[in-house]
């Protein structure tokens, strides 16, 4: 969950540019996908990290959407190197050791700057990092990354939208799957994890979701997760023994049922 090293954007940071001319990020847009009310956009330009310009672009892109998106993920990076580290996942069939080596190589090119606006429904959060400090500001509503299910608080770290080549279920035309990566303080039981997965399924408005839950942000062997989670102060890369010992629960399901199983067991 969120730790020290966070600081809130100054109260006037977003509003101080009232009347400012919105930035034109058409040339900076390297990805723009809208499917099933899920909108994901990636920008690469140093000026895209400006919170005012990014917030203005966010509102403009909402206005241009074919239908109002249920989920909008807007990522911004100063260059393609940072975009590749954070937005592209880890690539196919990478081992723990290979991922650790890539992380250590990236640390040699620190700092890595990035910004994200994550909106779910009417709730939108702006996050920024300069590679050391992390800032955040709620743009509308409440923080969409924080939720509670049963007795557990959770933080949604990352969403990955997959459009599959064929429907997921017989007689169901849906080909969209949303993979969610969630951090919590205490690893839940499979029953409690099912409540968290159902809460995300409802919030995202998607039938088919997968949810992976850990007590840290090191989803090392989950290949759709970034090389590391950039929007909290960077910690030490865990050893393989530490990574396994912290435990992990994986949930997969649709509107009919959600199944949750431990994939790594705490303390072992």
Image (cartoon, rainbow, N blue to C red):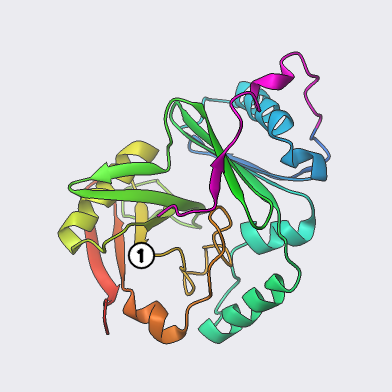
Determine whether the residue tagged by mark 1 lies in a helix, strand or loop. Answer: strand
Label 1 Cα neighbours within 10 Å, binned few <14 / some 14-19 / many ≥20: many
Residue 16: image quadrant is top right
**In this rendering, is residue 111 above or below 26?**
below
Q: Quadrant of the C terminus?
A: bottom left
In the depicted view, which residue is nearer to us: 135 or 251?
135
In the depicted view, which residue is nearer to us: 255 or 99?
99
Q: Quadrant of the N terminus?
A: bottom left
Q: Please state the horizontal and vertical placement of residue 40, each as a whole percent of the image.
A: 59, 42
Residue 93: image quadrant is bottom right
User: Can residue 73 be seen at all in this image of the molecule?
Assistant: no
Region rendered in magenta: 1-24
Q: Main secondary structure of the magenta part?
A: loop
In the depicted view, which residue is nearer to us: 258 or 103?
103
Residue 22: say if magenta. Answer: yes
Q: Please state the horizontal and vertical placement of residue 195, each as a whole percent of the image.
A: 21, 49
Residue 191: image quadrant is bottom left
**In this rendering, is residue 97 above or below 25?**
below
User: Can residue 112 be seen at all in this image of the molecule?
Assistant: yes
């Amino acid at each position: 969950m969120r730790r020290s090293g966070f600081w809130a954007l100054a109260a006037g940071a977003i509003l101080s540019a009232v009347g400012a001319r919105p930035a034109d990020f058409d040339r900076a847009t390297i990805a723009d996908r809208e499917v099933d009310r899920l909108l994901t956009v990636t920008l690469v330009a140093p000026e895209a990290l400006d919170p005012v310009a990014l917030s203005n672009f966010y509102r403009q892109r909402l206005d241009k959407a074919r239908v109002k998106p249920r989920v909008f993920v807007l990522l911004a990076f100063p260059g393609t190197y940072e975009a590749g580290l954070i937005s592209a996942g880890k690539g196919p069939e990478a081992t723990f050791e290979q991922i650790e080596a890539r992380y250590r190589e990236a640390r040699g090119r620190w700092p890595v700057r990035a910004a994200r606006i994550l909106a779910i429904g009417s709730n939108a959060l702006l996050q920024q990092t300069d590679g050391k400090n992390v800032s955040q500001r709620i743009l509308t509503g409440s923080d969409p990354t924080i939720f509670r299910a049963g007795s557990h608080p959770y933080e949604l770290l990352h969403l990955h939208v997959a459009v599959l080549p064929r429907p997921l279920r017989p007689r169901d035309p849906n080909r969209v799957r949303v993979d969610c990566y969630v951090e919590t303080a205490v690893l839940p039981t499979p029953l409690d994890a099912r409540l968290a997965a159902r809460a995300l399924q409802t919030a995202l408005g998607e039938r088919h979701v997968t949810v992976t839950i850990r007590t840290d942000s090191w989803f090392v062997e989950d290949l759709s997760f970034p090389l590391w989670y950039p929007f909290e102060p960077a910690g030490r890369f865990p050893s393989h023994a530490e990574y396994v010992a912290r435990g992990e629960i994986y949930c997969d399901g649709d509107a009919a049922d959600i199944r949750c199983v431990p994939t790594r067991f705490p303390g072992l």
